[in-house]
Image: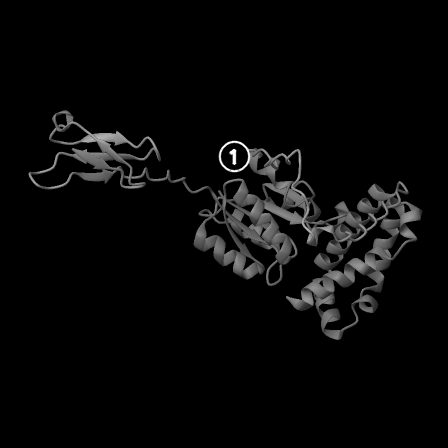
Amino acid sequence: MIAACPKCGSRYRIERERIEPAGARLRCSRCEVVFRVRPPSEGVAPAAVPSAPRAPEKRAPGPRMLVATPNADLGKETCAALERWGFETALVHDGVEAMLEVQRQLPRAIVVNANLPGMYGFQICEMVKRNESLRRIHVVLIGAIHAADRYRRPPDDLYGADAYLEEPDLPDGLAPILEGLDLPLRRPPRTEPRRRPARPAEAAAPTVAEEAPAPEPAAPPAPPVDDGLGELREEAERLARIIVSDIVLYNAEKFGAALEGGDVAAAMTAELDEGRSLFRERVDERVRREKDHLLEELLRVARLRAGA
């Protein structure tokens, strides 16, 4: 009898006596598909039944995480990192919404920015830790407090939070914190970079159209001048973000009124001057002379909040 592969159509001659009543499994030598051949009834061609494909293994869902931050881009970046590590994520940008999602989803952990609109992150933290049904939820408080005496509670209290992290350290700084909270990360396997195929030793002869002179290659851009201040500039930018975040966090009403008035720089002059005194103590003078780091960061935050 003749059996045909259901995928590529290759035909095979099979002795009918070797096929049991329940059929026989064959592997096509051309496309390697496995199919089953059943003995035909009289006058009926044999039927080839392809083997059922193996169902993909379902991966168990990871722990649920809630990220609450007013910075939309940073929130998406943080959620993407958490999902790579095997967590399910939800993202909100408002404190009231964050508290509602905590009660609705009951996540294993929340990453909450202290400077959320609607309800501060430390208020959410306190509510979670005081609630008997929620206190097992891990809370990672994200803030930018540059002076210990600015805490409304002692620095080691952290409003009941399980961990504290500064905003510039997101998302990578979360990894060791989550592992310390017994939330193991699923590290994706490393993939080898795809290698380009080797170029042939001899290229084909050019056609007439290819004999036209090629345009002159563009000159490579000049390498940046290394003046040795790169790391100092990064430290200055980070400190500026920390100081401004502190200013906005502990002067929320004044900052909100300044946004409505349209002149944030003038309204926050006293706070900026206080922050500059700390900035001068910690930042190299060569970097400070380049620009007003605190003012630029304050205006950036104002634009971000105004567009939210």
- On the image, the x and y values in percent for residue 71 come to 64, 57
**Image quarter for residue 225?**
top right
**Towards the viewer: 68 or 162:** 68
Check the picture and name the quadrant holding the N terminus. top left
As displayed, is residue 149 above or below residue 59?
Answer: below
Residue at numbered disc 1: 184
- On the image, the x and y values in percent for residue 207 come to 67, 49
Q: Residue at x 48, y 56 (%)?
A: 101
**Towards the viewer: 199 or 185:** 199
**Image quarter for residue 163?**
top right
Q: Residue at x 83, y 49 (%)?
A: 221
The outermost residue toward the front is: 208
The outermost residue toward the top is: 18
Q: Is residue 85 visible?
A: yes
- On the image, the x and y values in percent for residue 72 come to 62, 58
Q: Residue at x 92, y 53 (%)?
A: 289
Check the picture and name the quadrant holding the C terminus. bottom right
Task: Describe the element under mark 1 as helix, strand or loop.
Answer: loop
Q: Is residue 122 visible?
A: no
Look at label 1 and name its amino acid: Pro
**Towards the viewer: 182 or 220:** 220
**Image quarter for residue 253?**
bottom right
